[in-house]
Image (tube, rainbow, N blue to C red):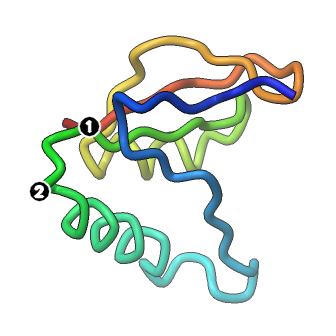
Amino acid sequence: MDNETTAAEIYLASLAVFPQYRGRGLAKRLIESACRLHAASGKPFGLLCAPGNDDAYRLYENLGFREIGIRFFVGIAMHHMQRK
């Protein structure tokens, strides 16, 4: 399996919201809280977004994440995004 993380960033490995709870801002609040908790580290907050997951990509952009490249995870080229 590909190693999608590095010591240079705080990495959000996984986040999922059950379909019946989507659209309520839960993911946004969880991500914002995680970013606040780790802000003192001085490291950027990173995550991967699957190609075609446009809703998640927009959410991450709205939260200040920017695509900085591509990382492979389980053989899939994923959008590597960071928030400084």
| Residue for point 62% across, 64% down | 15
Given the current orientation, which residue lies at the most extreme front position?
Answer: 7
Work out whether residue 83 or residue 60 is closer to the camera in this orientation and state it.
83
Residue lying at 70% horizontally and 35% vertically, measured from the top left: 50
Amino acid at dot 2: Ala
Q: Nearer the viewer, residue 56 or 6?
A: 6
Within 10 Å of the Cα at label 2, are there few (<14), some (14-19), or many (20+) other Cα atoms? few
Q: Quadrant of the C terminus?
A: top left
Looking at the picture, how far across and down is residue 8, in whole percent? 35, 28
Give me the disc on residue 20.
none
Q: 10 Å neighbourhood of mark 1: few (<14), some, or many (≥20)?
A: some
Left or right, residue 43 beside residue 16: left
Q: Are marks 1 and 2 in contact (CB under 8 Å)?
A: no
- Residue 1 percent location from the top left of the image: 87, 28
Image x and y of residue 6, in percent: 49, 28
Q: Secondary structure at mark 1?
A: loop
Q: Residue at x 68, y 41 (%)?
A: 53
| Quadrant position of residue 18 | bottom right
- Does dot 2 land on a helix, a strand or a loop? helix
Name the mark nearer the viewer: 1 or 2. 2
Where in the figure is residue 23, as x and y percent of width and height? 53, 76
Image height of 57 relative to 15, above or below:
above
Q: Amino acid at mark 1?
A: Pro
Residue found at x 13% / y 42%: 42
Q: Nearer the viewer, residue 56 or 1?
A: 1
Which label was assigned to residue 44?
Answer: 1
* Residue 77, above or below 10: above
Residue 40 - label:
2
